[in-house]
Image (cartoon, rainbow, N blue to C red):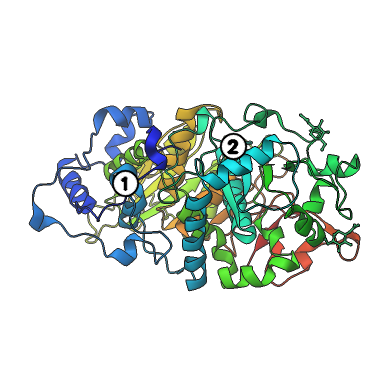
Amino acid sequence: MGGGSKAAGMEKREGSRSFSPGVVLIACMTTLPILVLTLGAYHSWSLDWLRGVTVVSLKGSEDESFISSPAPEDKLLGGLLAPGFDEESCLSRYQSALYRKASPHLPSRYLQARLRKYEAQHKKCGPGTDPYKKAIEQFKSNHSTGPMECNYIVWTPYNGLGNRMLTIASAFLYALLNNRILLIHVPKDLDDLFCEPFPETSWVLPSDFPIIDQLSSFHIRTPQSYANMLRNKVINKNSNGSLPAYVYLHLNHDYSELDKLFFCEDDQLFLKKFPWLVLKSDNYFIPALFLVPEYEEELRRLFPSRETVFHHLGRYLFHPTNTVWGMITRYYEAYLGKAEEKMGIQIRIFQFAPISSENLLDQILNCSRIENLLPEISLKGSSSSTTKAVRSKSVLVASLYSGYSEKIRDKYFEHAAAAGEIISVFQPSHEETQHTEKQTHNQKAWAEVYLLSFSDVLITSSWSTFGYMAQGLGGLKPYILALPENRNAPNPPCRRAMSMEPCFHSPPTYDCKAGKQVDKGALGPHVRHCEDVSRGLKLFD
Ligand SMILES: *[C@@H]1O[C@H](CO)[C@@H](O)[C@H](O)[C@H]1NC(C)=O
Ligand SMILES: *[C@@H]1O[C@H](CO)[C@@H](O)[C@H](O)[C@H]1NC(C)=O
Ligand SMILES: *[C@@H]1O[C@H](CO)[C@@H](O)[C@H](O)[C@H]1NC(C)=O
């Protein structure tokens, strides 16, 4: 996440250098071979393959007259992003606006103001500053007496890349609500994925952080967890005694009822006393923050439209590093850029809901047909040569296996689409199994999420955090493939999501005020059960 360079945290401010990626786009389109169905001859494309073949330089356009910089308001995504970053160190930050359609959802003025305030605070409290050094001294003393000038939440990675990004966003919103500084632990497998999101500082947890070697082994039985310290009376909400230096918040899907007290207002007030919180989670826990009375008003001001929370936070926080951005733009220009319509299909099979690839392919095609996402095929033979206006449609398939894209491609290769459309089917990579521990795997996965987020229409798999990323970044309400039942696709095969928000898969069910279990999905007008995970919680407008 260090932008590939050790100094990425200290990006220098300069005026906006103007070179136009748009120029590169146009140039590439004219020089690259026309890529349509003939590419079906290749059995697999991987980004590695592409890396060797298509080298797109994003620098060095000499022709000044050809340059038209994007409008500043687009570049900053409606005031979401701060101006003044060094553009070269993270090209995606200001260039993504050129690839993705402008979002119809603008960040509220209040959110913009809070982000700028957060950035100033992070710069003041970030690694290397005096307040940070003081807080580290406090940490080392193994006790705390209350909040300090600067207080922190340390995010630690757990589970797949999608889960990690969802929890970074959740941790950031939590930091925003509590005036804490978010620091993220970046092991090797997460290096060179994300640029620094905050200007002139760093969000990377320094490598000399006192317990950095222990972070990856924290789990539900770690003595420093909130639940275990309550249970063992190391801490007491009602006493004024000395407190330990930090609390470990265990918010993984396997968390206990005591861990879930995190979502109670009293516990939130108590946790404010700790300068340091350490968080591990694989869940998008933001919906439950909307149910904490203390945060209600602030969240309403930050996000007048509830279902844009991840849409805004995701585009604010996650900027592919130049390495990943290179993969994204090369692939886009080679395969997707020319299509008039872009469709994304994100396929994920979970062990708890198996289905054969034939059935799943049928389910996808049935969904596409019923929802009019892909054209009918004409069995009368080729009709495309006679129609006048031929529309081109690209279908990007993201899956660990290559079979799906090949079969969809074959279908449109063998039979012309009835309306004479040209359908091109691509799959950037297929890794067969998920390797979250590998950096290159994560880079490819991140590139794919980003490419999917350029789609006009998206089909996603139930339960997939990967799909949540793409829909959130793209501002799309996907068609969600129903979870297989007894190895079969249910009827209907898919349904349209009512909100583009990710789902909180394992929410708490405890009503802190009433002191009993409740159905939180029935609690508020803006939090309901998810389309794909019935016990899950999701934000709606
Ligand atoms: C803790 O301190 C607060 C204020 O400092 C005081 O109001 C409260 O009574 C104290 N509680 C206990 C249990 O000592
Ligand atoms: C830190 O303090 C806690 C109690 O607050 C204690 O259980 C623990 O042993 C202490 N650790 C060290 C390294 O002193
Ligand atoms: C797809 O649709 C066809 C025709 O309606 C139906 O016979 C078939 O069972 C469906 N398959 C799946 C997997 O949904």
At horizontal 69% and vertical 45% (from top left) the residue drawn is 277
Between 114 and 467, the residue placed more toward the observer is: 114
Q: Position of residue 446 (x, y in %)?
A: 46, 40
Between 414 and 77, the residue placed more toward the observer is: 77
Viewer can see residue 392: no
The 10 Å Cα crowd at callout 1, few under 14, some 14 to 19, many 20 or more, is many
- Determine which residue is flagged by label 2: 160
* Mark number displayed over residue 40: none
At horizontal 67% and vertical 59% (from top left) the residue drawn is 287
Q: Is 487 above or below relative to 262?
A: above
Q: Position of residue 479 (x, y in %)?
A: 55, 56
Q: Position of residue 275 (x, y in %)?
A: 68, 48
Toward which corner of the image does residue 32 lie, by quadrant? top left
- Determine which residue is flagged by label 1: 91
> Which element is circle 2 on?
loop
At horizontal 62% and vertical 43% (from top left) the residue drawn is 135
Mark 1: amino acid: Leu
Mark 2: amino acid: Gly
Between 143 and 45, the residue placed more toward the observer is: 143
